[in-house]
Amino acid sequence: MNRIKTVFSKQNHALLGELVRTDFKLRYQGSILGYAWSLLRPLFIFAILYVVFVKFLKLGNGIPHYPVYLLFGIVVWNFFAEMTVQSLGSIVGRGDLIRKVKIPRWIIVISTSISALINLMLNMIVIAIFMIFGHVAVSLSIIYLPLIIIEVYLLALGIALFLSAAFVKYRDINYIWEVVLQAGFYATPIIYPLSRITSITLQKIILLNPMAQALQDARYSLITHATITPQKIFKGGPYDYIPYLVVGIILIVGTVYFNSQAKSFAENI
Amino acid sequence: MKEKAVIYVGNVSKAFKLPHEKQGSLKSVIVNFWRHKKGYEIQDVLKDVSFEVKEGEFLGIVGRNGSGKSTLLKILSGIYSPTSGDVRIEGRLTPFIELGVGFSPELTGRENIYLNGSLLGFTRKQMQNMYDDIVEFAELERFMDQKLKNYSSGMQVRLAFSIAIRAQSDILVLDEVLAVGDEAFQRKCYDYFYSLKRNNKTVIIVTHDMAAVENFCTRAILIEGGKILKAGDPRNVAQSYKELFLPPEQEQPEEVFEEPPVLETPKRWGTKKIIFKKVKVTKNQKNITIHLQMDTKEQVKSQTTLAYTVKSADGSSLFGDSFEIGNDISDGTEIDAAITFSNILSKGEYYIDISVRDVLSGIYYDFWSDCTSFDVIHAPENALHILTNSKITIETQAIPATSK
């Protein structure tokens, strides 16, 4: 009870706010367009992907609104990747604070994650613009979207807590994670539609990955009901729950490991 | 109220793992695991430290570099956790391990105030209320919208200090805050300390400034080698701290001359009725003693005096004295004399002339210039003595002529 009180104390709230603010101010420090880059970056990346995958490779044949479908996938994956990568180095990067001030260590990871969330929200504005231009009809299933985003956030948070704590001791973690992320990018149906995978078994295996499940569900809820979702593939049954279970386990392991290491951050950095 | 302990430290020990080589990589962990090798060494920084701090106390922690005092401070602040033992803190504690922690050079002064304030536990609203006072106190009104990287280091310290003194904690922990800044800043620091004392705050400071310890602290702790060497009255602790820096007194080599020199030299001459056999200088903090051993070769029947002169390295005489040692000294008498004088000398090297002579005729039995030298490494703290207060103790031992 006491612990929960300190987690939500006014001081921590204020500190979190300042850290996020600082992060945001420093991000586009010195660039002429400043915050505009938060929107311009995804726009340009999308333009490239659009040309390569929609115009040349024609991957999206058969999927309605494939350009937005593709962009949305990229946006969600980028949120996951950005949050984990930024958090990974956050504890070490804020070593000056850790060694000299008594602040709850998790605040640093949370502040990084909130910065990533803010970025996601900005990117969602871009998505909304494209949905309007692409005449994507919004259905009632959009109400599931926040829940799916929360799922991705919790998954990323569990990983972020684990990686940031491990990085204090083992500085190889960032290279390993870079490779894992790259593999994950292709293991998740982001740039290719899941329907392109002809083997049902392979589709099932792919969908056990929480990121793949979340991505497909998110596309289903926001863009088109033609998206293949785990419910459609597994047709109910226990396999449906495996991605959520994975998220839960990762979150618990990450939190427990982070807490066990937090006490010695100051001396190990 | 004064009796309440607000900080309780019980049997606290802290050990650090020091990696042997560049560890911190998975490979070295795996390799070391394979070889059953520990990739680190354990260093005990604090050993079984216990003390209490009562409400309203101003505690000074002193010690040499590497004695473990900063580690202790970080444990009190909750930045490190102790390897064993426990720490209990009653009330809110704010550590100042450094001024301006979290300052970002790319942010403006204004933004840094808010960021730094949040690290001290202030909400944005509280900071807004204090903002004008902070800026005014730091005397930086014109610079608040400039980036911190364009501030001089003095300006940064002023800004950090102005924020720091807003901390409303019951307990404040300050590490070497005095070490920075010019004289005007130091005065501000002292004013701040006085105000803390007036407001009955509990304060712990780590410092090398013994004047501050003696002026502000109600109690002090001296840490050496991770242990509390001394605790109590700040004056005594400050004194013990200073003594830590004195190297062990070196024994001056004994100058032994069993036989009188055959030839007279410009440095040593006389009739050799009485000769100096051994000369040695010993020192302590207060006094310097010349130990002399003389041998009587021929009986002397007149008043005899022993004299010494202390000279500086350039050869000028500084002071000296003479002592009567007898008027009938029989053949074969060995005389041991110890001349003690107050150490009023400043750092440097000194030489000694000694002589023994017949007072009436002025004939020297043995005159020895520059017979020995000694170094003063630590000048005495308070050289109040203008006089050297030379004293002599003499022991004579008559050796029967038959035994010769």
Image: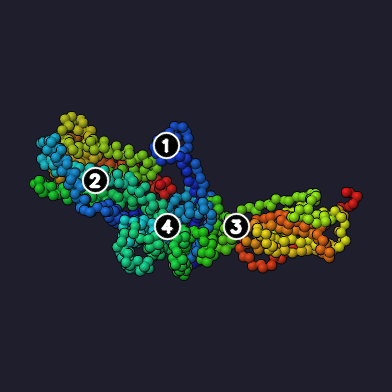
Q: Chain of mark 2?
A: A
State which tag comes first along the sequence, 1 or 4. Answer: 1
Dot 3 falls on a residue whose secondary structure is helix
Q: Position of residue B207 (x, y in %)?
A: 50, 59
State which tag comes first along the sequence, 1 or 3. Answer: 1
Q: Is residue A149 visible?
A: yes
Q: Is residue A240 visible?
A: no
Given the image, on which type of amino acid does mark 1 rest?
Val
Marks 1 and 2, how far apart at CA: 32 Å
Residue at 42% across / 37% down in the picture?
A: B29
Is A35 on the left-hand or right-hand side of A51? right
Residue at 40% across / 65% down in the picture?
A: B165
Q: Position of residue B294 (x, y in %)?
A: 80, 55
Q: Are marks 1 and 2 on the same chain?
A: no
Given the image, on which type of amino acid does mark 2 rest?
Phe
- Between B360 and A252, the one lying in front of the other is B360
| Mark in front: 1 vs 4 | 4
The residue under label 4 is: B98
State which tag comes first along the sequence, 4 or 3. Answer: 4
Q: Chain of mark 4?
A: B
Marks 1 and 4, how far apart at CA: 33 Å
The residue under label 2 is: A79
Marks 1 and 3, how far apart at CA: 44 Å
Q: Are marks 4 and 3 on the same chain?
A: yes
- Between A149 and B328, the one lying in front of the other is B328
Given the image, on which type of amino acid does mark 3 rest?
Glu
The residue under label 3 is: B243
Q: Chain of mark 3?
A: B
- Give the color scheme: rainbow, by chain, secondary structure or one colour: rainbow
